[in-house]
Image (cartoon, rainbow, N blue to C red):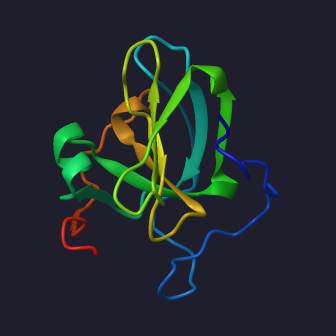
Amino acid sequence: MSVANLDQPEDAIVNDANSGTPMGSRPLRRYEGSCHCGAIRFEIETDFPELTRCDCSICRRKNALMVKVHESRFKLLSGEDSLTEYRFHTMTARHFFCKTCGIYPFHRKRVTPDHFGINVFCLHGFEPDGIPVRQTVGAAMA
């Protein structure tokens, strides 16, 4: 199992896909996250421009609140052998879960496969208060 292409230049600039400008008005910060049992540990850098909830069949069931992070801002610290992967429909999005505790910490996105959707409730010391939440329409995607 490989989450592939995680090692990108650390000085890469993450731009908003629509405007080409730097995202968010909060400072870029590094967060560490994990699954419930701690087997999977990861790190992200983000300025939390927004959080998203998706209405597709899997996201409705896992009820995750997510932040979109470019692969250059994601680092798997440990637990690659503890990840299991689930794909469905177009087989493009790659949803990762812990084999031991079953928690969903992140997924590779379908529309932007060079980005991860991170389950913000897996981030240590993070509170989503005050960050706008956008509802995404995954159920209507063909």
- In the displayed structure, would residue 101 be above or below residue 53? above
Left or right side of 129 for 6: right
| Residue depicted at x 45% and y 22% | 35
Residue 12 sits in quarter: bottom right
State the residue in front, 86 or 112: 86
Residue 135 sits in quarter: bottom left
- In the displayed structure, would residue 39 be above or below residue 85? above
Left or right side of 41 for 53: left
Quarter holding the C terminus?
bottom left
- In the displayed structure, would residue 35 be above or below residue 5? above
Q: Position of residue 78 (x, y in %)?
A: 67, 23
Residue 89 sits in quarter: bottom left
Q: Position of residue 43 (x, y in %)?
A: 61, 36
| Residue depicted at x 38% and y 41% | 119
Left or right side of 51 for 74: right
Q: Position of residue 27 (x, y in %)?
A: 53, 57
State the residue in front, 106 or 15: 106
Left or right side of 61 for 49: right
